[in-house]
């Protein structure tokens, strides 16, 4: 008898009632339910801070938005070159810094220095500044 090894176990709906069952599967078995973030697979959208928000520098953005799901969920990769600008959030965002160095400062709060490997959540109502010291790339999940 040959042993079967599975990469992970997940919960999957079994019927319209929403009951779930534990199903072991190999990565890729449900390709229509997975998504990888490969910046080479998608042309990035170019952008920059609005002029009235710019504090210093001439930062440029590149965004690879890989997912736009029901309920106002967005996921992808964002990159910015050095500069500083004001930010105001109406949405909730989780992000993980992949490379670079940035400083996020909430109005009236302490500066938070971010580098590769750091993660953060910005909640609705956040107002402050984002300063890119070294070109920064992050992956993100946003809920509007």
Image (cartoon, rainbow, N blue to C red):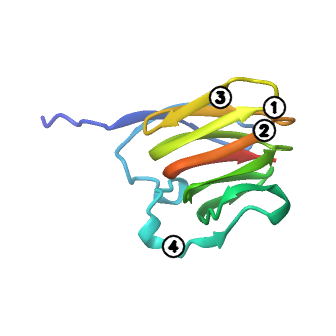
Q: Which mark is residue 111?
A: 3
Crowding around mark 3 (Cα neighbors within 10 Å: few <14, some 14 to 19, many 20+) is some
Q: In this orientation, which residue lies closer to the viewer: 132 or 39?
A: 132
Q: Cα distance, mark 3 to mark 2? A: 10 Å
Q: Which mark is residue 59?
A: none
- The residue positioned 78% from the left and 38% from the top of the image is 128
Check disc 2 and report its element: helix, strand or loop. Answer: strand
Q: Cα distance, mark 4 to mark 2? A: 31 Å
Q: Position of residue 111 (x, y in %)?
A: 65, 28
Q: Cα distance, mark 3 to mark 4? A: 33 Å
Check disc 1 and report its element: helix, strand or loop. Answer: loop
Which mark is nearer the camera, 4 or 2?
Answer: 2
Q: Position of residue 22 (x, y in %)?
A: 50, 30
In the image, residue 77 above or below residue 91: below
Q: In this orientation, which residue lies closer to the viewer: 110 or 97?
A: 110
Q: In this orientation, which residue lies closer to the viewer: 19 or 143?
A: 143
Q: Which mark is residue 107?
A: 1
Q: Earlier in the sequence, mark 3 or mark 4?
A: 4
Q: Earlier in the sequence, mark 1 or mark 4?
A: 4
- The residue positioned 73% from the left and 51% from the top of the image is 85
């Amino acid at each position: 008898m040959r042993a079967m090894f599975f990469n992970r176990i997940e919960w999957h709906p079994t019927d319209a009632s929403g009951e779930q069952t534990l199903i072991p599967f190999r990565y890729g078995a449900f390709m229509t339910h997975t998504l990888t973030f490969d910046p080479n697979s998608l042309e990035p959208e170019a952008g920059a801070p609005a002029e009235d928000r710019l504090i210093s520098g001439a930062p440029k953005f590149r965004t690879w938005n890989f997912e736009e799901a029901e309920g106002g969920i967005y996921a992808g990769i964002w990159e910015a070159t050095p500069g500083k600008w004001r930010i105001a959030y109406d949405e909730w965002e989780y992000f993980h810094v992949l490379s670079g160095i940035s400083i996020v400062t909430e109005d009236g709060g302490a500066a938070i220095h971010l580098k590769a490997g750091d993660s953060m959540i910005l909640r609705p109502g956040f107002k402050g500044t984002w300063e890119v010291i070294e070109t920064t790339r992050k992956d993100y999940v946003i809920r509007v």
